[in-house]
Image (cartoon, rainbow, N blue to C red):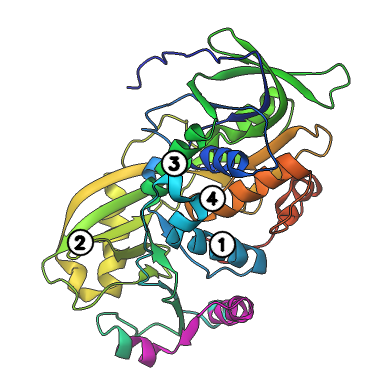
Amino acid sequence: MAQALKTQSPSRASYDVVIIGGAMMGSSTAWFLTSNPDFNGTVLVIERDPSYEFAATSHSNSCIRQQFSTALNVQISQFGAAFIQDLPRYMGEAADAPKLKIQSYGYMYLADTAAFADVLRASYKVQTAQGAATQLMTADQIKAAYPFYNVDDLVLGSINTQNEGYFDGITLFDMFRRNARRQGAEYIANEVVAITKNATDNRVDSITLASGDVVACGQLVNATGTRGAKTAAMAGIYIPIEPRKRFTWIFTAEQPLDRPLPLTIDPSGVHFRQDGKASYMAGGHADHDPAVPHDDFSMDHALWENHIWPAIAARIPQFEAIKVMREWVGHYDMNTLDQNAIVGPHNEIANFLFLNGFSGHGLQQSPAMGRGTAEWLIYGCYRSLDLSPLGIARVLRNEPFLEKAII
């Protein structure tokens, strides 16, 4: 059970930018803000769980891919891959950032129907137009390259083994947070309990903290993960975000594979990949996938026995004899409209910015999202990559930003 929050009061009564949520998205934004020479304001980052024990950042599988069906999502991850693998250059000498590497075993999407094969072909055209190294493979080609797969039911596969796989997401997060603080962002352990707007309801004036402190803010960023809808509601705003359980298992095999296992997205909905030299990771969720309380991290053991393991063993017969070494439950901050992020300013409350609803894509998208949010806070527009298609306007129109490559 989580311990009661020991709150810290901010050092000032007013800040130019207040970021609610200090995990990956909030810290990425804080770092990009404080790194920009055109910004000389004050930044406060408020985090209710300074241990980050229950943050989605801590429970992530730390994967990155370019295999999306929309050009914007491809571009977002391409910047993420570049940033991750050239961290010392992006962060500068003073940051003491390590050289990170993407384990590019790739994502292998498997299609067992003609309809999904057509989706893979259409997405392939989008990805390669953006310079991604995606390849389409017939069942025979998949079997030749990865003999351990059962391909009897497959129509087509799609894989990219360049800048696509998994990486050390916790180190990236630590670099964002540590260097944002070094550059002047103030982090406190506290919780926002109220948001106060001006008399005409078109600006946020201040926030009230659990400690009783009232803090005035020039601009406010909602980076509260699965609590994003709760935070928005304090300002009288609705966004379709809710916590959804996602399960992860680490296992070993009695007969290990003779080559690295790509992150395989099976038609069953189960996904699995190489995790270490002799271990593997699997993930998935139940068919019944309701919203859950923010503190519900209970494991569903029947899900492994009845769905996850059978699907893995059916696709890779060598995995009929495996041993689970570790398991955990995390949460997606699920955008129920279209499983894509909601970013940028509110249409009426101009100084309230969203950074919500990443639906499992957060770590890989954090560099582009932090950069874009910082640009909007400083310049009032996006300069590097136009993120406006992911703005609140589509939510208000109930028009999804359609992304077909959702896991």
Sequence order check: which comes first, mark 4 or mark 2? Answer: 2
Which mark lies nearer to you, 1 or 2? 1
Indicate the secondary structure of the residue bearing disc 3. helix
Residue 132 screen position, x and y as percent? 54, 77
Residue 214 screen position, x and y as percent? 65, 11
Question: What's under tag 4, amino acid-wise?
Answer: Ser
Residue at image coords 61%, 14%: 12
Residue at image coords 45%, 70%: 163
Quadrant of the image occupied by residue 319? bottom left
Q: Disc 1 to disc 3, how far (Cα)?
A: 21 Å
Instruction: Determine whether, in the image, residue 290 is placed left or right of residue 302.
Output: right
Indicate the secondary structure of the residue bearing disc 2. loop
Residue stretch rendered in magenta on the structure: 117-143
User: According to the image, label 4 marks what residue?
Assistant: 366
Residue 117 screen position, x and y as percent? 53, 81
Circle 3: is it few (<14), some (14-19), or many (20+) Cα within 10 Å? many
Query: Which label belongs to residue 122?
Result: none
The answer to whether residue 76 is above or below residue 220 is below
Q: Disc 1 to disc 2, how far (Cα)?
A: 29 Å
Sequence order check: which comes first, mark 3 or mark 2? Answer: 3
Sequence order check: which comes first, mark 1 or mark 4? Answer: 1
Q: Main secondary structure of the magenta part?
A: helix
Circle 2: is it few (<14), some (14-19), or many (20+) Cα within 10 Å? some
User: According to the image, label 1 marks what residue?
Assistant: 79
User: According to the image, label 2 marks what residue?
Assistant: 279
User: According to the image, label 3 marks what residue?
Assistant: 56
Q: Nearer the viewer, residue 288 or 380?
A: 380
Q: Nearer the viewer, residue 75 or 225?
A: 75
Instruction: Determine whether, in the image, residue 359 is placed left or right of residue 174.
Output: right
- Please check the rendered image and state whether residue 139 is part of the magenta-colored stretch, yes or no: yes
Question: What's under tag 3, amino acid-wise?
Answer: Ala
Question: What's under tag 2, amino acid-wise?
Answer: Ser
